[in-house]
Amino acid sequence: MFFLALLSGFVLMIPFDVDNPYRSITQMLLVNPYASWIRNVHYWSSQLFLLFLLLHMYEHFKTKNPIRLKHAVWFRLTLGLLVVFMIMFIGFLLRGDADTIQARQIVERLTVGIPLIGNLLAFAIFGVRGSFQLIYINHVATFTILALLFIFEHSRKVWPELKGFVFAMAVIFLMSFYFTAPLHDNVNPTVKGPWYFLGLQDLLHWLSHPQWLWALIVAMLILVFTGGLKRRAVYFSSRRILLVFAIVYGVLTIDGLFFRGENWRTVFPWQKDYKYQVFEAYHFNKVDFNSEKFAGDINGSAVINGRQESCLLCHDKVQGFSASHNPEIAGCFSCHGGNPFSMEKEAAHKHMILIPGNLSNAERSCGTTGCHPDIVERTSNGLMATLSGMINVDRYVFNEQSTPDGSADMASLHHSAADEHLKNLCVRCHLGNDKVTTGPVTEESRGGGCLACHLNYNKNALQNHKEIHAKRNAEESIKFHPSVDLKVTNDHCFGCHSRSGRIATNYEGWHETTLKAEDVGQKKDYRLVEGYRVFRKVTDDVHHAAGMDCIDCHTSYELMGDGKRYQHQENQQDVSCTDCHTENPDTISPLRLDEESAVIAGLRFGNIGGRSLVRTQKHKVPLINTYVINDSVFLVGKNNGITHFIKPPAARCQRDKAHENLTCSACHTSWAPTCIGCHNEYDPDEPGYNMVLNKEQRGSWVEFVGEYNALPPTLGVRLDISGNKIIPVIPVMVLTINPKSFNKKLHDSLIFQRLFAPAAPHTTMKQGRSCKSCHNNPLALGYGKGTLSYSVKDGIGKWSFRPFYEPNLHDGLPEDAWIPFLGSRTGKVATRSNLKPFTIIQQQKILTVGACLTCHDEQSEIMKQALVDFNAVLKQKKSACIIPLFR
């Protein structure tokens, strides 16, 4: 085996370039199958040489009466063992890939740490940092010659036996034809040393003082030496210790080889990314000697991460990439995987990721080394991936848990009634839902991981996709690749956020109805979504009217998560109105930006030096598309570049303390979507769909829709660490559920819930709500739609309410009510544990002001004084002013 490695090494010296070792090896793999095969011969013969050497040692120590050698000879053989490991290790370093670069850094640092001789020894073995010249000389000459001398002294032979040599050569030649020697792709984040040093790598991870490793190596050499002495007691003691060490080291090697992944993470064979973490370096494809497949100009192709890829030799004329994802910079392999070291089509495309960016493959595409590993990890913990709030609330509504709070994720879904309901109707918008077909993001798109936001098709890419999809050019490769970039349009948000709270449609001014497509035809101010959902045009958000996109407000840390796990949307939400609409913005210098914000700012706007940027009050995240001049805030559209002057709050928003607990959205939301009267039932014969497994099934939960409305929101009280805040809320869970239809248990009674949820309607209007729209409005107070009247009779003022909807049979309240008129409720009232309706006392205070507003104009002096001190105004009231009596 040694002579096979030696002879193949001499041949390998011809195509090997010591100045660019990694690149020269990739060139061999791509365009020189003969050199590639010789490299395989060199690798496998050297590995088997070491393996047989270790077996020979075991055979020697196992023999009861081993051959006794002179102490000097045995000492040299012991040193020879060290030389063999050195020649193997520095040969490993000559690959020049990510594995070897890290291994070299580690061993160089350890060597330099040796007292007195460390620096000299490190230079003698490794030479100048970044150079492979001295390593190459030591491998092909210094240590090889030493190894030959030790082998000759031990065997007293120059050449091996012909019969054994021919047999070994036949085995190695055949093995090298089918099994390619490993080479790290410089993308996979799992980096390991050679297999015979993985035990040491394991020890290094656990040792608090890495230099102790040298003492361990010296101790093992001493044991090997003493194991060859003639003194029987010493021999057997050394042998036993060596046996124990061999067992322990073997276990550590197996652990390091088969169960260690990225960042020392433990991986197991049943994990989905196990092969990627453990065996990806071994592209076991057969060497193809068909010269017709190696006609590309390898020297003219781009160098990516120190290597040259086979992908670009075939797909070199593809257009449409963004600058940061141009294959001339990032290559194809970093996104799509496959085998970049093969020119054979089938082998190159084997295990290729057709649609990278899905969370199921993001660690192997977007999250690879040198790309976005931190962002991928953050995104997996964000609410769009975990759906924690959705899952907990649904289980709470189904009475399967006692609180709407808690930590949950998609992996926690099982087969309860609530979980099946989620699978059938809700979780398709889960960001981890794979995009399984190529094509642009549309209003029907759900999930798709990174591509859900960052995939863009221009006209050429769309046309090319249609041609390929129609198989008109089945024999031709893709010509126009879709772009993956920072341009995140409202269309990207629309697919998922046009459901439930419908903030994407609200923002554009569209309200969903229960009409059917045939009911509206081509009527103006109506649109169809997904071909069957009918929306009616109402008022759009003032920010949308000004030309602002969703991402003009929402940051990457807010959308993709900041790495923490949050329970509900409002917990992860970071940006607020007062971050920008303020006279005293919290600012940050561009010089103090975190790396991600700085990179994104540079890509979007170039040099932003000299400007102070606004940062959020909640999480202190910089808003890179803002800047402050004097006390004025400006915002630049991330997609269209339009600059907006951000007005500070109006004087009326700051003139009193009576409304200091009101959030901006409580006053400035023009309308919100509401849903009442829904019923949920499981139909075992209904053709259904499992949104987790992405497959059709028989049996599904069916939701019978009640009524959709677009109305001003109700107001509620959120209790948090900053105090009580008045926020908009909507009736999202006034519904019935038939659990018996799913569980088939006759004693399961019908579930009725009347739950309101916090709302972020995204229907901001410039003018705030009028005083009467809250104080004299039954909908705002939680009574529901209807007529709220104030009458005075016999000097007594009294409020009365006539609801628009009939009482619900289950609780006697009007269908759209949150609370009874001037009453309260106990038990479940909201989809958050910290959200409550107004108390009776709060209702009375609100209606007392409302009584005043029945006579006094809200802009009158007396009402303006009431904003400052309402009690003082009441003390000065005239006899004609009748304050309501509440009993």
Image: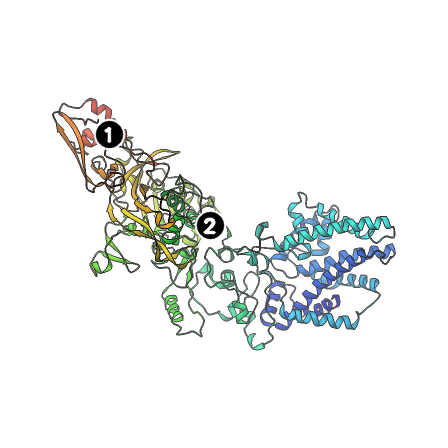
Q: Position of residue 784 (x, y in %)?
A: 23, 40
- Which quadrant is home to the C terminus? top left
Q: Is residue 673 left or right of residue 579?
A: left
Which corner quadrant of the image does residue 780 belong to? top left
Query: How are the residues colored?
Result: rainbow
Can you identify the residue that label 1 sits on?
A: 844
How crowded pointer 2 is (Cα within 10 Å; few <14, some 14-19, many 20+) is rated as few
Q: Which mark is residue 173?
A: none
Which residue is farthest left? 794
Q: Secondary structure at mark 1?
A: helix
Q: Position of residue 7 (x, y in %)?
A: 73, 69
How crowded pointer 1 is (Cα within 10 Å; few <14, some 14-19, many 20+) is rated as some
State if disc 2 and disc 1 touch (CB < 8 Å): no
Callout 2 amino acid: Ala
Query: Distance of mark 1 from mark 2, alpha carbons?
Result: 47 Å
Give the residue drawn at x 64%, y 53%: 256
Q: Is residue 674 left or right of residue 9?
A: left
Which corner quadrant of the image does residue 29 belong to? bottom right
Q: Position of residue 109 (x, y in %)?
A: 67, 49
Q: Is residue 853 visible?
A: yes
Can you identify the residue that label 2 sits on?
A: 411
Which residue is farthest front? 746
409 relative to 727, above or below: below
Q: Secondary structure at mark 2?
A: helix
297 relative to 652, above or below: below
Q: Nearer the viewer, residue 280 or 86?
A: 280
755 relative to 303, above or below: above
Callout 1 amino acid: Gln
